[in-house]
Image: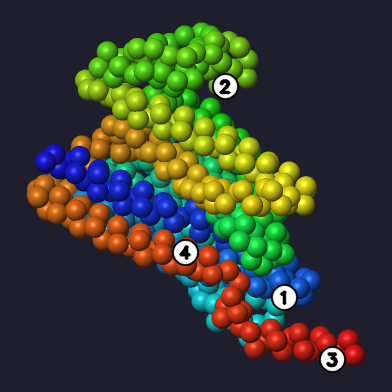
Amino acid sequence: MDIVLLSRWQFALNTIYHFFFVPLTLGLGWFVAILETMYARSGNLLYKRLTKFWGKLFLINYAMGVVTGIVMEFQFGMNWSEYSRFVGDVFGAPLAVEGLLAFFLESTFLGVWIFGWERLSKKLHAAVMWLVAIGGNLSAFWILAANGFMQHPVGYAIVNGRAQMTDFGALLGNPRALYLFLHTFFAGLVTASFFMLGFSIYHLVKKQEVEAFRKSFVLSALIGLLSTIAVGGAGHIQGVYLREVQPMAAAASEAHYETANPADFHLIAGIDQDGRKTTWSVTIPRALSFLYFFKWEGEVEGLNQVQARYEQLYGPGNYIPNIALTFWSFRVMVGVGLLMGLLSLGALVIAWKKYPEKWIERSGWLVWIILLPYLANTTGWVLTETGRQPWVVHGLMQTKDAVSPNLAPATVLISLIGFVLIYAVLMVIDLYLLVKFAKKGLGAGDLDSVPIAGEVEAKKKGGK
C-alpha cells in the first residue's frame, strides 16, 4: 500500500490506455486528408467512399482518446499536487495552449468536417480535414513540450521553492521535446499505416471492394515503409541526445554498467539489478560507441559512474532506474520496428506483383499486424518514462516528493481498481465498434448514397 507506487500505477495505466488512441489519431488524420484530397482533385467517387470509411474509424478512435486524456489532467491535481505546485507555472503554460488553441482548432474543424459534407465545396471540405490533422499534431507538440521539460528542464528559475518560466522560447525549442515530437509524429504515421494495411488485407482476402482496398493497401504500405524508416532515424537521433542530457537513462537502456572506450553493445543480456552487472550477454564489440559517435571508439559513461556522480551532485540515494524494464522495453520497441519495416517492404513488393491469388488466399492472418505498432508505442513510452526515474522532473524533483500529501492509499487503490474496470469496458466497446465498422467495409449505408447517385447521374447526362 505504498502511496507513491499506487499513484504511479494509476497514472501509468491511464497513460498507457490513453496512448492506445493517440498515435492512431495523429496518423490517421493525415491519411483521411490525403484520400479526400485525391477525391477533390480527381472527382473519383471511390476516394470519397474510402475517405468516409477511414474517417468513421478515425472519429471512433478520436472520441475515446479525448475521454481518457481529460482524466489524466485531473490526476495532476488529485494524485500529484506537490508536483503541480512545484512546476505548475511552467508545465501549465503548454497544456493551456494545447487546450485553448490546438485542441479547440482540431475539434472545431472536425465538427465542420462531419457536418460539412455536400455543404462545402470538395476542395474546401478537404482543406478542413487537413486542419483537423494539423490541429491534432499541434496538440501532441504542446504536450510533448511539457513532457520535454520534465525530461530536460530549460527556460526556468527556482523562485521561493517553485519552478517559474523565464524563457518560453527555450521551452518550445528544447531539443528533448523536439526529438520526442518528431519520434511521436512518425510513430503516428506508422500506427495508422498498419491499421489501414491490416484492414485492407482483411477485405482483399474476403474479396470485398477489391479495387478500393487495393488503393488503401498501396497507400498504407508506401507511407508505412517511409515512416518506419523515419521513426527509426528520429529515435536514433533522440538516443544520441539522451546520452548527453540523461546519461543514466541512456546507460540503463543499454545495461551499460561500467564506463568504457570503446563500448560494446549488448544485443540481449541477463540483468542483475542488485549487483549492478549483467549475468550473461550476447555482445557486439565496439558497437555502442559506433551508435553514439559513428565511429568504432568513444567513451560511453556507465551506470555505476553516473550513480557516483549523481550522489555527489544531488546527495545520497539510488538514482538507477529499473534496468531490466528499460533494457527490454528498448529492444522490444526496436525489434518490432524492424519487423514492421520488413512487412511494409513486403507489402509493396506484393502490390508491385499485382496481388497474386495465392498470397490473397493465404494471408488472412496478416490482419494481426495491426497490433504491432501498439506494442512498439507502449514499450517506447515505458522506456521514456521509467528511464527517467527516480525523477519526475529530471534533476529537480523526485517522484516520491511529487505525490499529494495526506492522500489515503485506500482511496488510490479503490480508484485504481475502478479505472481498470471502467477502462476494460471502454476498451471492449471501442474494439467492438472499430472491428464492426471496419469489417462492414464500404457499405451502402455509409456512402450518402443519394448524393453519390445524383453525382453519377449528372455525369451520365453530361456525357450524353
Q: Amino acid at mark 1?
A: Leu
From the viewer's side, name the closer residue of 246 and 355: 355
Labelled disc at residue 291 = 2
Q: Does label 2 or label 4 sit earlier along the sequence?
A: 2
Which residue is labeled 1 in the image?
Answer: 45
Which residue is labeled 4 in the image?
Answer: 434
Q: Amino acid at mark 4?
A: Leu
Which residue is labeled 3 in the image?
Answer: 461
- Figure check: 98 above or below 445: above
| Residue 209 percent across, percent down from the top left | 66, 67
Q: Amino acid at mark 2?
A: Leu
Q: Amino acid at mark 3?
A: Lys
Q: Does label 3 or label 2 sit earlier along the sequence?
A: 2
Mark yes or no: residue 192 visible: no
- Considering every residue shown, the one lying at the far right of the view is 464
Q: Residues within 10 Å of mark 3 (few under 14, many from 20)?
A: few
Do residues under tags 3 and 4 come within 8 Å of each other at their CB atoms? no
Instruction: Tell me which residue sits at (34%, 25%) in the image.
Output: 323
Q: Nearer the viewer, mark 3 or mark 2?
A: 3
Q: CA distance from mark 3 to mark 1?
A: 17 Å
State the quadrant of the N terminus. Answer: top left
Q: Does label 2 or label 1 sit earlier along the sequence?
A: 1
Q: CA distance from mark 3 to mark 4?
A: 39 Å
